[in-house]
Each structure stands twice: as structure tokens, then as C-alpha cells.
Amino acid sequence: MQKIIGIVAEYNPFHNGHIYQLNKIKEKYKDSIIIVCLSSSFTQRGELSILSKWEKTEVALLSGADIVIELPYVYATQSSDIFAKYSIQLLNSVHINTLCFGTEKENIEDIINAAKTQINNLEYDNLVKKYLKEGINYPTALNKALKELSNIEINEPNDLLALSYIKEIYKNKYDIELFNIKRTSNYHDILSNDDIVSASNIRYKILNNQDYKNSIPEFVYNILKNKQFNDKYFELLKYKIISDSNLDKYLDVDEGIDLRIKKVISKSNTLDELINNIKSKRYTYNKISRMLNHILCSFTKEENKQVNKLEYLRILGFNKTGQEYLNTIKKDIKLPILNSYDTNYKALEIEKRITEIYSNIYENIIDIETTNKPIIINKK
């Protein structure tokens, strides 16, 4: 049976580690079809994507992917479990039979056992609630409950995402095999000059005017070297926080934290400083970063309720192999396939707003967003 491989990606930015992953897939499964489910203008941690979704789509196709589909903003900027839920649903809708993902661990039996514990052990949820009542943050509560019940700890970002993917596959009984590739770099290392480093390492070097050329493909470097990075994100966020009297309507802004945000905004001079001024035992850096992004983008709790089911499948690009595969499965895809921009879909209406915000604070892609057809790379 032909392998239809799914990858969930952010490509912020696309780098040599991503080339390594795609090459490893092709090496193991020579005639496979690779489908990338790609986050759009902002990432799961609420960060701005330094390559636009269209640039990310093109570089993925040029590097070995066959099809790129969009993970809409409304799912892409949420907790790992929600991020995983909708990305796996989308990949399942295009009939992948294998999910490929990066991990810190070489052997993923612990992650699989952890997923089974979280799904099947009734005591797990009770323990999580108990730890949350003690005032610790959600990821720590999950890990403490897991360790208590199974003596397993899952701490690293890629392993935590893998755990969310595996849970989603098992809960829904998707017929999807697991294929993990051990990371060759340390996610937390922002100083290494190796050929393969983390995306956070590259972003740090870009923002600090350090050399990063050997860590990314040349065609990606040629895109990034012409980018203009600025502080508009924080400037607009600060204005929004100061001028908006009701922050707790936005997703992830819990009661009480809105007052803390208002209190510290005036003495914060950068986004990082603001997040650290809000950060507490209960609120992690990443949760606050997502929360602030939802404030900036006016993504409300009410809107989130309106998009709790997938409405469509949006294909961002494909090559000839991908096009041939899509033609064979098109009649079996249950979601509407969008070939043009249709804001009658709530998630896409929000996507348009998000793209306008992205265009105003970073790079203007709104015209491309609303008129572009899928990118087609004419090679197999």
C-alpha cells in the first residue's frame, strides 16, 4: 500500500531540519505522497510567522512536499491539544495513513503509553483538577498527574506535541501509523551554529543581526534577507490593550488576568517584557503569548464557539504528484474543498481579518490571500 504521509508544520522559518525530515521520509518510503498541514500567519505560540503562508507553501513544495493544506488561524494558535485535534482531522480528511513528526526521544513507547494513560485512566482527570486547584499551570498539572499514574514524564516541546497527536489518533481510532524522527538539534539552544538548528535559534539570530545562512536552504535565505523586521506587533498590541475596556471577551483571557495585563502594559517596552511581567505560576510564557495574540487579532471566546467544527479544506498548493492524488480522492473528501475565497465560512472570514492584521504589522499579502489560487509546482 502506498504511504500517504502527513506532517503538521509551522515552518517559522523553513530550515535544514525540515529538509532533513522530508529527505528521511523519501528515503524510507520512496514512492510516498507527503501532505503538509501548515499553520498560517501566526504560530501555535502566538508568534508572527516570518515567512508568509504562501512563501512557506512554495518552499515546502520545492523541498519535497506534494500537497500543502492550511490549518486555519482559529485552530493554529491554540493549545497543543486543540492544535493537534484539527490538524489531524484535516490530514485524516485527505486520507493519510502515516503521520510523521519530530521528537526529542528516539523511542516513543513512553509517549504512546502516556497517551493511553491520559485517554483511559479515569483517575487522570481528577488528578489534573486537583493540581490546577493548587494554582499550578495546566501543562505542569498534566505532567504531574502523568508521572503519578505512570511514572512517565513528557517535558520537551516536540514530545508534548507528539503526545497530543497520538492522543487524537487513538481517541478517534484513525487508521494512521506513527513515524517519528528524532531531532538532531536542541530546541532550547539559540547559540549553536550547526547546519541543523531550531527555528527559535534562527529567529533569534535574525532579530539580533547574526549570521544564520548555513542553517537554512539558499532559496529561503534569499527570501528572508529582504524582509524588514519591526516592532509594529507590540506597538499595535499595546494600543489595543490600553484602548479596549473589555479584554476578557478574548479567547484565553481568564477572569482576573485582564486586570493584570492592564496593570503592567504601561511599564512594558517589548513583547517579551510584557509577557514576563504577566507570567506567573499559573500562566506559562506560551499561554500568555497566545492570549496576547488573540487580543491583538480580536479573536473572541464567542467566535471560538462558532468554529468548533471544521467547515472546509483549503489547499494552498501542490505539485503534479499531489494533483494526481487529489483527483483520485476528491469524491471521498467529505469537507468542501475551497478553490476560491469564500467568507461565508466563519473560519475563513476570521482568516481574512487575521491576514489584514498580518499585512498591516509585517508584510502586505491581503491581495494574494483573497485572489490567489493554489500554488502549482510543475514537477513530480
Image: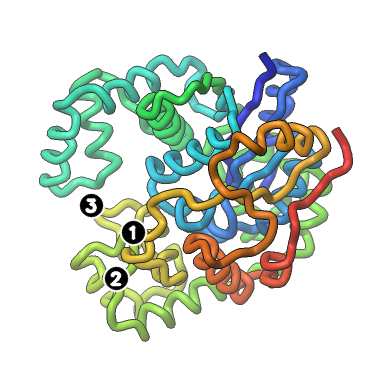
Check the picture and name the quadrant holding the N terminus: top right
Q: Is residue 344 above or below residue 121?
A: below
Question: 10 Å neighbourhood of mark 2: few (<14), some, or many (≥20)?
Answer: some
Task: Indicate the amino acid at tag 3.
Answer: Arg
Q: Is residue 230 above or below residue 86?
A: below
Q: Residue at x 31, y 59 (%)?
A: 252
Give SS at disc 2. helix
Q: Residue at x 35, y 28 (%)?
A: 171
Marks 2/1: CA–CA distance: 12 Å
Q: Which residue is mark 2?
A: 249
Residue 21 drawn at (x, y percent): 67, 29
Marks 3/2: CA–CA distance: 20 Å
Mark 3 and mark 1 lie on one chain; the one further toward the N terminus is 3
Looking at this rendering, what residue extends furthest in the front direction?
331
Q: Is residue 30 above or below residue 313?
A: above
Question: 10 Å neighbourhood of mark 1: few (<14), some, or many (≥20)?
Answer: few
Towards the viewer: 144 or 8: 8
Q: Identify the mark at residue 305; answer none if there is no mark.
A: 1
Task: Indicate the amino acid at tag 1.
Answer: Lys
Question: 10 Å neighbourhood of mark 3: few (<14), some, or many (≥20)?
Answer: some
Q: Identify the mark at residue 282; answer none if there is no mark.
A: 3
